[in-house]
Image: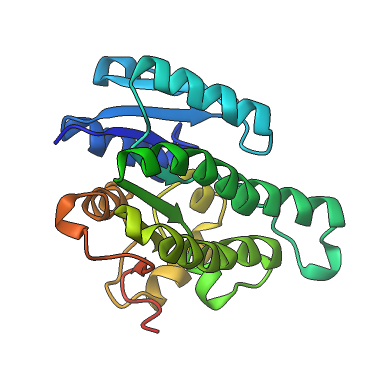
Amino acid sequence: MERVVLITGGNRGIGLATAKTFAAKGNKVAITYRETPPDGIEDLGIHSFSCDVTDQDQVDKAFKEVEETLGTVEILIANAGITRDALTARTSDIDFSEVLDTNLTGAFRTAKKALRGMMKNRWGRVIFISSLSGRIGQIGQSSYAASKSALIGLSRSLAKEYASRNITVNVVAPGAVKTEMLEKLSNDQISEYIESIPLGRLGEPEEIGEIIAFLSSEQASYITGSVIPVDGGLYMG
């Protein structure tokens, strides 16, 4: 069935790969971007809208534009995120707050907005994109790990609140995936990372997109409040 899908932070990496996956399956797809929209996505039938998820007015505007263009959002992928990596002693209050405001509160803002339409339709899917860091922590990522870990508690609360309306809420927690964020690491760091992964390789953004698409389908209607790791077996907890 064709659904209206909104992916925040969909201009690159996992977000863009997920948008392409949903579009290929015949859905009406919209992405948000903060700075630069990706080239050529209109040819794939993907619509793009400017939105900074730390600004409620921009979130409201983006949802209005999506609804006017495609219809009520039925599937929300809360993917927008930033990092400000540094050891905790060197992390400023401003950097810590900016990461949480984008990764956690931004996800809350968009989910809260999407849930209103989902409740009326008595059907919906909300998927938060967490991270391996949010499950096990990571040196130099106290702010990022805190924000991604908190998404799990948020998702499980929403899962319980909206289950009676046929709305599922889940978390996908990718490990090391070939994205721009990972490319900031040195070759030696990436090699060490790969050595620690049981499957012996990095993940592809498209692999994450397929998992997200499955969780959004009718076949996954009995899955809610779950955290789905996609990390090559790196953390089997």
Residue shown at the point (37%, 20%) measured from the top left: 47
Q: Is residue 40 visible?
A: no
Q: In the image shown, does 61 or 214 lie closer to the viewer? A: 61
Looking at the figure, which quarter contains the N terminus?
top left
Q: In the image shown, does 157 or 90 lie closer to the viewer? A: 157
How is the rendered protein coloured?
Answer: rainbow
Q: Tell how many labels.
A: 0
Direction from residue 141 to residue 162 in the image, left or right: left
Relative height, residue 37 to residue 86 (above, below): above
Relative height, residue 189 to residue 116 (above, below): below
Residue 23: image x %, image y %?
A: 23, 30
Residue 108: image x %, image y %?
A: 58, 49
Q: In the image shown, does 28 or 44 lie closer to the viewer? A: 28
Residue shown at the point (21%, 58%) measured from the top left: 221
Q: In the image shown, does 89 or 61 lie closer to the viewer? A: 61
Q: Residue 185's quadrant in the figure?
A: bottom right
Direction from residue 85 to residue 49 in the image, left or right: left
Relative height, residue 178 to residue 4 (above, below): below
Q: Is residue 47 visible?
A: yes
Residue 200: image x %, image y %?
A: 30, 71
Residue shown at the point (81%, 61%) measured from the top left: 91
Residue 8: image x %, image y %?
A: 48, 37
Looking at the figure, which quarter contains the C terminus?
bottom left
Relative height, residue 146 to residue 121 (above, below): below
Direction from residue 148 to residue 91 in the image, left or right: right
Residue shown at the point (41%, 37%) measured from the top left: 7
